[in-house]
Amino acid sequence: MLPLLSLLQELRRDGIHPIFRQLAEQLRELIASGQLPPGTRLPGSRELAKHLQISRLSVVHAYELLQNLGMLHSQVGKGTFVSAMQEVPEESRGVLTPASFSERQRLPIPHSSLHEMVDICPPQNQLISFLSGSLPYDFFPLQSVREAIDAVLDRDGAQALRYEPSTGYLPLRRSICEHVCSNGIRCQPDEVLITGGAQQSIDLILQALTQPGDAIVSANPTFLGLLDSLCARRLQVLGLPLDDEGMELTKLEEALQKPDRQAPALIFAAPCFHNPTGVEMSLPRRRHLLRLASQYQIPILEDGVFHEFRYEGTPLPPLKALDEEGIVIYSSTFSKNLLPGINTSYIIAPAGQHERFQIIHHAAEVATASLNQRVVQWLLEQGIVANQLGCNLRVMQRRRDAALYAAEHFFPREWRWRRPLGGFFLWVELPAVGPNASELYRQALEHGVSFAIGDYFFARCSDQRHLRLNFTEQEPKRICEGFQRLVRAWKTLVPCEKPLPVHP
């Protein structure tokens, strides 16, 4: 017991991460570094909880997480032991080793990181928040949705309240085909599958196309929901860095050319205003990705959620619109532009894959909610979805412009960011020297402002130097005030003689 206690660092009860996750991460590092060698018996949960002065449940949760990874194993009546190194998943070792393309990743513990950040925030009326990944509620067409519900109930009566087949409401699937046609995607209703949200779509596709231990290619950083699903399904992440044109494909191509390397099971791509960075993949890069996927027969899951949220520049075709070989699976949702609670999303897949997805979806959800789908179909048919998007984009562009103005005028010159041509987010990189994003977050809350800590979006440990700011959440004046608060928090940690300018 005593040697282990001497190795453990103090657990922060006021930290962003819960106690059990802090303990699990420390134990993982001790195992990976060899300080807790195979066969080491760990103290019982009651004993360790008593010495650390934490709840026994926190210790139990930490042990369970590491057991799920194969790093610990229990023997009835004997205790909990460190597993032999060959039993430790490769993806959980060497997570601190920097690599631009590697199967080594941080401990894949499922997390609710944004929820954790929300939990420690002060009351909303005292806070300027840039934290969420959605539009504020006043962007959604409440009156139109109310009219749609009434119209659907008047038209369909009790039929609107029945179960729909797991494939989804047929008129909605037809309307989706017409909706995506404007983006260059050609499809038939029997290629469309309705799901209960973008996260469900991703998880369904992973379940259909992968097995535990398979590798998935993604940008690094990437969508937080993807990381959660990969963790739950015990999949590895091959993380590709991003530049101004999107995912850098050179290292992927080099890896695929190695004869002894197993090809990834899937490529996850968000070519339009990538979450969290806001980067848009260039057209040559899109064509290059399609060529690689076709050559090595690797399906692409295209996240098209932000495709329509463009403020400037020439629209680029989705990967699905450029796909001539049926290798792209397209996923999108109506939740960003309509009420999130409607939670209606869709997958467009070639016939062979669509059938496989349908079988898995049916097993998980024998029937789907009819009223929501009929409401969305009515809104599409009446042109309300398109009109609402146009109204939202005008307001969002003003907020994007306000964010760029405030960043240019208030942020320290050492901070770096890209001009997003669309999407919701400003991705900010802090200087290499100074407080990291987690330290800034805690201080920012004291100043009444919040953001998303960028480290949570990385498949492997990052340098903790990034912030994701959702500029759509606030009106322009609040954006300027929020950015000034953020800089004041930074200057509390890094004093500077130059006074912060005050926005008129």
Image (cartoon, helix red, strand yellow):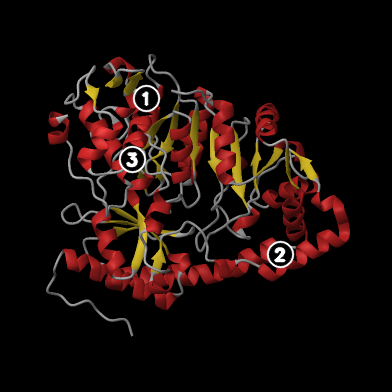
Q: Which mark is residue 255?
A: 1
Residue 350 position, x and y percent, is: 67, 32
Crowding near pointer 3: few (<14 within 10 Å), some, many (20+)?
some
Q: Hey, what amino acid is under mark 1?
A: Ala
Q: Which mark is residue 236?
A: none
Q: Secondary structure at mark 3?
A: helix
Counting residues from the start of the chain, the first of labels 1 and 2 encountered is 2
Residue that label 3 marks: 58
Q: Which residue is nearer to you in this view: 342 or 332?
A: 342
Residue 257 lies in quadrant:
top left
Q: Secondary structure at mark 2?
A: helix
Measured Cα–Cα span from mark 1 to mark 2: 49 Å
Marks 3 & 2, CB-CB < 8 Å contact: no
Q: Hey, what amino acid is under mark 3?
A: Ser
Foreground label between 1 and 2: 2
Measured Cα–Cα span from mark 3 to mark 1: 40 Å
